[in-house]
Amino acid sequence: MDNGLQRRTEFVSFDGSIRIATLHQRPDRYRHLDNILNRTLIARGGGYAYSAASFGANSCSLEMTAFDRMLNFDPAKSTLEVEAGARVIDVCKWAIHRGLQVPVIPGYPLVTIGGCIAADVHGKNPWRDGTFADWIRAVTIFHPDRGYVNVTSENDPALFEMTCGGFGLTGVIVSATLQLTPLPGTDMDLTSQPVHTLAEAVELLAASTEDFCYSWHNATPGRSFGRGLVTSGRWVQGVRDDPSLRYRPMSARTRAVFPLSVWNSLTVRCANALFYRMNGQWRPRCRMNLLDAAFPLARNAAYLAGFGRSGMRELQIFLDAASIGPFIGALEHFTARERQPLIMASLKRFHGRQRSLSPTGAGYLIAIDFLPGRAADRLMAQIDGLMLELGGQPNLSKDSRISREVAARSIRNYGTFAEGLRRYDPSRRFGSELSERIGL
Amino acid sequence: MSYLIVGASTGLGRALAEEYASAGFDLVLISRDRRDTEPLAAHLRIRFGIAAIALAADLARDDCLTGVDDALAQVSPLRGVLLPVGGSDPDDEIGLSGELMGRLVNSNFLNPCRLLNVLLPRLRGGEVVGFGSVAGTRGRTRNAAYAASKRALMTYFESLRHWAGGEEIAVRFYIPGYLDTNLAFSQDLLFRAADTRRFARRVRADTGLTRTRYFPAYWRFIVSLLLLLPWKIYRRLKI
């Protein structure tokens, strides 16, 4: 595609921490892929990864959003073949009209199907539903040296598993076949139960039998550290009017439109207290349409935009059931010592089988948001050490600063993934800032 | 009712296909590469439940019309023909080769007109929509053959409008400015590129009208100014 259809674009990671100006192409025909540049490439979807997974100083980003068509629907099997640039919200809305659902949905509606596969995202109940890759029946990937390859867990299990959660390093995901499931209803009854500590939330999550369950916590240092809400959702049987989702689309660039952050120690405490009271005391139960329930980030865009140009930092760490307790205890200790204004934390219970770089397994995923700064960097380094000590794993799509050493020691499949990639693609045609940073 | 869209695979053509499919019209989609129109046709069938047929055709060849006839036989009666077709080339400068010039004139002017002439007898009570370019309003320092062929197309559509009055065919011609296509993607533009989906909505909203229209509308003002400029000033702009 060296035909004048490229430009230089300054990309920014969704957390605002990485800005890189690099080559950018937006193929919209299959022959554009056939004639692709002879240099390092990386596919890009909606650009909602917090890390720089879809761009890099030495890579040309291929924005795949024009490849967003539905290719085949098999009503008997409830499978939908769709191009990788299709947005999750569009597939969800289409499926709802047919009484079907995408079982695992990320938190923002404009994430693409290719992005969901590359990061092997999770939804609101990974304990019951697993991760996105569990619902992928086939992917078609394009590699300049190998052409188009249709990969399933049967015909090439190694490549299939490297691609699901492989951050686009095996090639451009062009299309995928999704397994849809029957839609129980278009509404959910949500209940928010107040908890005083993260440990209390872990107990509630472990006992939950609801259709989905996650927790939110105040993480500012002090007496109210860990105070939060465990939100459980249960389907309301029956389908009513078309569910709608009202939101203002946000990109990494528009998220960072404010020059300054509105969040500081004081405003974070006030906002957390208000959120806790609104959802825990004033409105502990509500009925919500499934799109509003599935895409909380779309409804809470002000929270993300409030971080301004300097952005936020987020860590997501997967820990097994035996390690989550010690981790929470140490986290509270670190936070009190550093007086670092963490903002919020959340917990989800997980179940699944790890395929490539994205973490899953039986245990818990804890997400922690920070205000950026030197204190946050120090605290995150301490948390890295704790994660290594407890055998935890980072979520690379959310972590824009993890080092090669920490990644190599913490990601269980790091060695096998690196070896598999060397065998599959000796010329290493695909790479990003993320892959370079973690040494892949 | 159905529409035939030439150049349907990407950009404005694709936006028009989605717009008309969302309104329930059957479609015949023509482009050179079936790999692009086949997925689009499948998408429109799945998404909107219409009949959509993808056709790979080189309009420069006489035998392409057989395929068009076969495709039209498989959908509801033809209501209109949309021609968002054409292309430019970075080597399109004064002194370009005859071969390249021929290719540009064919794709932007001759081929769509040839197809149109064949289909006109079937379009009584229907409509024909052509697409020019603001590049064709006055000679520029580059894209000479492209601009000239778009200008020729505009003139042809004016003649068509004279003829079509008696045939009850609505003839519309749009003169778009910068559109958010892959062509504009790589260029530094003076004005923001317009959304092709918004343009497609405009085209459908004008159904049945006979007129020439700029899109976005402010281009009429810009073009009028450019036409008023004395040559001595215009040539210094190096547009």
Image (tube, coloured by chain):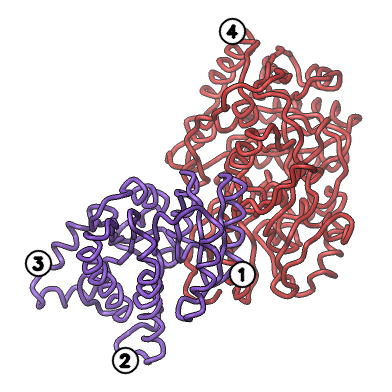
Chain colours: A red, B purple
Where residue A6 sits in the image (x, y, percent)?
49, 69
Residue sitting at x 65%, y 70%: A40
Where residue B79 sits in the image (x, y, percent)?
40, 54
Q: Amino acid at mark 2?
A: Gly
Q: Are marks 3 and 2 on the same chain?
A: yes
Element type where label 1 sits in the image = helix
Q: Are marks 4 and 3 on the same chain?
A: no
Q: Which callout, 3 or 2, points at the residue further toward the start of the chain?
A: 2
Left or right, A14 with respect to A417, comes to: left
Label 2: which residue?
B95
Residue toward you, A260 or A39: A39
Label 4: which residue?
A282
Label 3: which residue?
B228
Element type where label 4 sits in the image = helix
Where residue B195 sits in the image (x, y, percent)?
39, 52
Q: Which callout, 4 or 1, points at the residue further toward the start of the chain?
A: 1
Q: Are marks 4 and 2 on the same chain?
A: no
Residue toward you, A263 or A277: A277
Image quarter where the C terminus of chain A lies is bottom right
Label 3 neighbour load within 10 Å: few <14, some 14-19, many 20+ = few
Residue sitting at x 83%, y 20%: A209
Label 1 neighbour load within 10 Å: few <14, some 14-19, many 20+ = many
Label 4 neighbour load within 10 Å: few <14, some 14-19, many 20+ = few
Q: Disc 4 or disc 1, which is closer to the eye?
A: 1
Q: Amino acid at mark 4?
A: Trp
What is the number of the mark on residue B17?
A: none
What is the number of the mark on residue A33?
A: 1
> Is there CB contact under 8 Å for labels 4 and 2?
no
Q: CA distance from mark 4 to mark 1?
A: 54 Å
Label 2 neighbour load within 10 Å: few <14, some 14-19, many 20+ = few
Element type where label 3 sits in the image = helix
